[in-house]
Image (cartoon, rainbow, N blue to C red):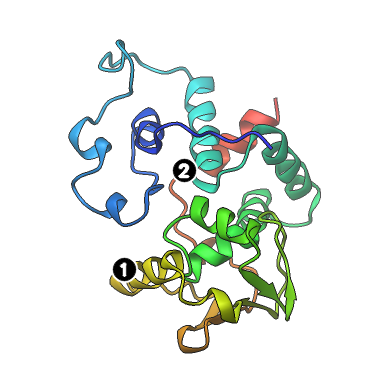
């Protein structure tokens, strides 16, 4: 599947805020968004007022880039969320947060979602004791994510766990046992549990046109 392989800092600059895509560096003042807080390109410094459509589009693009999801898959997620009973915005975020690559990152086993995807594809993780190498695999309540015994000493795991400890990151819907290199996806998170950096209503309105 095609993926964006360009500079990650450029994506944050395009959206106008830190998307935290580069691991530990994203949490320092060395990021490009901290040094050049304007969009990339020769017209990046122009403060042109955006239309309502432009604002909605930027919200969608930012959320897609945070989770590393392409347009076709993101639209499918939205359509699935829209069919569910309850709030569409909450259902959409639950779908994104239940992806295996996001859970691996949130558990602190990778410094970012991109690294988590690479590790998953290389077969470093077990779900309920079985190898799963699909980053978009969706977890259900009670599923146990575990790093394979032979993969627990690789550098990516070490860096992920060190960063998670520094950030004191512990989402309430995950139960992580770092000593055993495993964690449980205890439940779907609610909107109140999550720190959503974009206006989800913008995305709903954009796709509802």
Judged from this view, the residue extending furthest toward the right is: 83
- Residue, disc 2: 198
Q: Quadrant of residue 150?
A: bottom right
Q: Give the quadrant of residue 165.
A: bottom left
How far across and down, in percent of the image, does residue 58 sit? 48, 29
Between disc 1 and disc 2, the foreground one is 1
Question: Which percent across, then down, holds residue 204?
Answer: 63, 37
Where residue 66 appears, as percent x and y from the top left, is 49, 45
Residue 129 is situated, as x and y percent measured from the top left of the image, at: 73, 81
Q: Which residue is mark 1?
A: 167
* Residue beneath the point at 70% across and 67% down: 139
- Residue at coordinates 63% horizontally, 59% vertically from top-left? 122
Q: CA distance from mark 1 to mark 2?
A: 21 Å
Q: Nearer the viewer, residue 3 or 27?
A: 3
Say few, some or many: other residues with alpha carbon within 10 Å of mark 2 (under 14 / 14 to 19 / 20 or more): some
Q: Earlier in the sequence, mark 1 or mark 2?
A: 1
State yes or no: discs 1 and 2 in contact (Cβ < 8 Å).
Answer: no
Q: Relative to the observer, which residue lies in front, 141 or 122? A: 122
Name the side, left or right, on which 128 lies relative to 151.
Answer: right
Residue located 20% across and 45% down the image:
30
């Amino acid at each position: 599947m095609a993926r964006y392989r360009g500079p990650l800092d450029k994506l944050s600059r395009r959206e106008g805020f830190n998307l935290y895509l580069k691991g530990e560096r994203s949490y320092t003042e060395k990021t490009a968004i901290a040094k050049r807080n304007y969009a990339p390109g020769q017209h990046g410094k122009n403060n042109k007022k955006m239309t309502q459509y432009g604002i909605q589009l930027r919200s969608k693009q930012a959320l897609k880039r945070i989770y590393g999801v392409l347009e076709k898959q993101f639209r499918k997620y939205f359509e699935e969320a829209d069919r569910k009973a309850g709030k569409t915005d909450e259902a959409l975020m639950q779908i994104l947060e239940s992806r295996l690559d996001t859970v691996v990152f949130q558990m602190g086993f990778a410094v970012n979602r991109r690294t988590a995807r690479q590790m998953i594809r290389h077969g470093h993780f077990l779900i309920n004791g079985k190898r799963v190498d699909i980053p978009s695999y969706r977890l259900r309540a009670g599923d146990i994510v575990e790093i394979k015994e032979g993969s627990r000493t690789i550098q990516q795991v070490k860096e992920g766990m060190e960063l998670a400890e520094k950030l004191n990151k512990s989402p309430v819907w995950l139960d992580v046992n770092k000593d055993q290199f495993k964690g449980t996806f205890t439940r779907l998170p609610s909107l109140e549990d999550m720190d959503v950096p974009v206006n989800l209503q913008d995305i709903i309105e954009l796709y509802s046109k």
